[in-house]
Image (cartoon, rainbow, N blue to C red):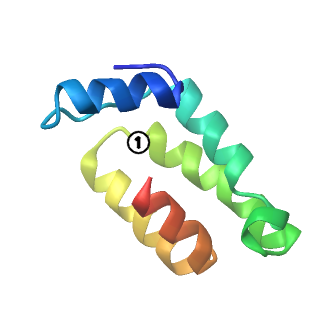
Amino acid sequence: MADKDIGERDAIKQCLPDTRVLICLFHTLRSLQREVSCSKMGITEGQRSLCPELLQKMAYASSEEEYEELHTQLATDAPNEVVKYFDTN
């Protein structure tokens, strides 16, 4: 577990290439809010406003089944740019 520092995460990956580096939930949600923006993704304000609530629900899902249902909703309702960013990051 690391913080959002890219340099730190890159150093961990170099030293431990088979290790999966995670950041805390707080920084994850904050990064998603910052990156899912109209200007960065070319989406409308209406499209953007749906995403933070749905992403937060996914983060706090009480089961894998609930998470998968919410991910399906994200894939259906959110712009492709947001889904692609989420799945990649």
Tell me which amino acid carries mark 1: Ala
Q: Residue at x 44, y 52 (%)?
A: 89
Q: Residue 11 sits in which quadrant?
A: top left
Up-down: is 5 above or below 81? above
**Foreground residue among 78 and 3:** 3
Q: Is residue 21 above or below residue 84?
A: above
- For the point 39% across and 28% down, which residue is it? 9
Above or below: residue 39 compared with residue 36 = below
Secondary structure beneath dot 1 equals loop
Comparing 13 with 65, the one in front is 13
| Image location of residue 75, percent across then percent down | 48, 74
- 32 left or right of 50 in image: left
Residue 24 seen in this snapshot: no
Residue at the image point whose x is 48% and y is 27% from the top = 7
Q: Nearer the viewer, residue 5 or 44?
A: 5
Q: Quadrant of residue 70?
A: bottom left
Number of numbered discs overlaid on the protein picture:
1
Density class for disc 1 (Cα within 10 Å; few <14, some 14-19, many ≥20) is some
Q: Is residue 44 left or right of residue 20?
A: right
Q: As rendered, which of 83 and 8 lies closer to the eye?
A: 8
- Name the spot of residue 21 as percent of width and height, x first: 30, 31
Report the residue marked by disc 1.
61
Residue furthest out toward the left: 18
Residue 10 seen in the figure: yes
- x, y (%) of residue 43? 78, 75
Query: Percent x, y for residue 51?
Result: 66, 59
